[in-house]
Amino acid sequence: MTPEILGAAAMLGSAMTHAVMGMLTKSSGDKLVFRSVMMLTSALLFSPILFLLPPPPDDAWPFLIMGMGLHFVFQMAMISAFDRGDMNLVYPVMRGAAPAMAAFFAFTILGETLSVLQMAGLALASATLIGFAWPDKGTAPKVTALAFAILAAVMTALYSVNDASGVRATGNPITYLAWFFVMTSLPITGMAILRRGRNWPMIARKEVVAAAPSAILGAASYGFALFAFSIAAIAPMAAMRETSVVFGAILAALILKEPFGQKRTLLAILLAAGLVLLQVG
C-alpha cells in the first residue's frame, strides 16, 4: 500500500470521526464547557505517554506552542459559529474553506507544489464544499455565523500546516499528539472556568456524558490526520479530511433533523470527483 493510499484511508477515518464530534458539539447544552471537558479528557487519556516516551526535540516546541494558540482561536470561532447557525450552514464552511488555504500555506511556507490536476481537484473540492453552505433561494445568509465559520477555516488551514511541520520535527506522531492534547486543553479550559466561574463543575458533570466519548473521537480524528500528514503531502490530505462535511450533512439530517436534499447529494458527488482528481494528480 502506497503512502498516498494509506494516508487517504487515514484521512477518511479522520473525516468520519470528526463529523460525529462536530455533531456532538453542536447538540451540547453549553458548547464552551463541552469543549473544555472534551479536551481535558483527551489530555488525561494521553498524559501517560508523556512519561513513557522521550519529550519532543527542541525543533518541535515552537510548533506545539504555536498550535496551542491556533487551536484555541479555532475552538472559540467554532463555538461562536455553532451558537449562531445550523450545523448544515456553518460546518461545511468551516471544513470547506480550509483546503485551498492549506494548499496556499503549504506552497508558500513548506514549498510543496501541486500538479495541474491536483489544483483542479482542489478547486472543485473547495467549491463544492462551500456550496454545501450556500443559502437557498429566498433566504438570507447569517453573516455573523458565516464570519466565525470562515475564521475557523482560516485557523484550520494554519494549524494543518503548523502541526504537519511539528509532527515531522518530532519524528513520532504519538509523542506530538500527547503533548498537543495536554497543551491545547489548557487555554480552552481556562476560558471556560473564567466565563462560567463556580458553575463550571456543575455544567461539566452534565456535559461529560457526551464530551468523554467525543474526546475519544477527537483523539482518533486528529491521530489519523497527523499520521496522514506525516507520510503524504499536506494539501491533498487536508482536502481528503474535508469529506467530513458529507458525513456531517448526513448526521445533521438524521440526528439533528436538518435538511439534506438533492442539492447536497449532487455536491457530494462533485466533491468525490474533486478528491479523485487530487489523488490521480
Image: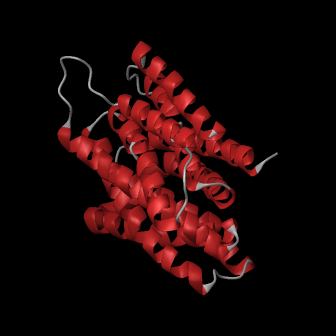
- The image shows residue 28, relative to residue 261, as above or below, that is below
Residue at left 28%, top 62%? Answer: 196
Q: How many marks?
A: 0
| Residue 49 picture quarter | bottom right
Residue at left 46%, top 76%? Answer: 65
**x and y percentages locating residue 262 in the rendered image:** 43, 13
Residue 202 visible to an observer of this rendering: no
Residue at left 61%, top 33%? Answer: 276
Return the residue nearer the eye: 60 or 80: 60
- As drawn, the residue found furthest toward the front would be 116
| Residue 71 picture quarter | bottom left
**x and y percentages locating residue 220 in the rendered image:** 63, 51
**x and y percentages locating residue 13 in the rendered image:** 64, 42
Classify residue 81 as left or right of residue 18. left
Return the residue nearer the eye: 244 or 279: 279
Q: Quadrant of the C terminus?
A: top right
Return the residue nearer the eye: 39 or 1: 1
Classify residue 62 as left or right of residue 177. left
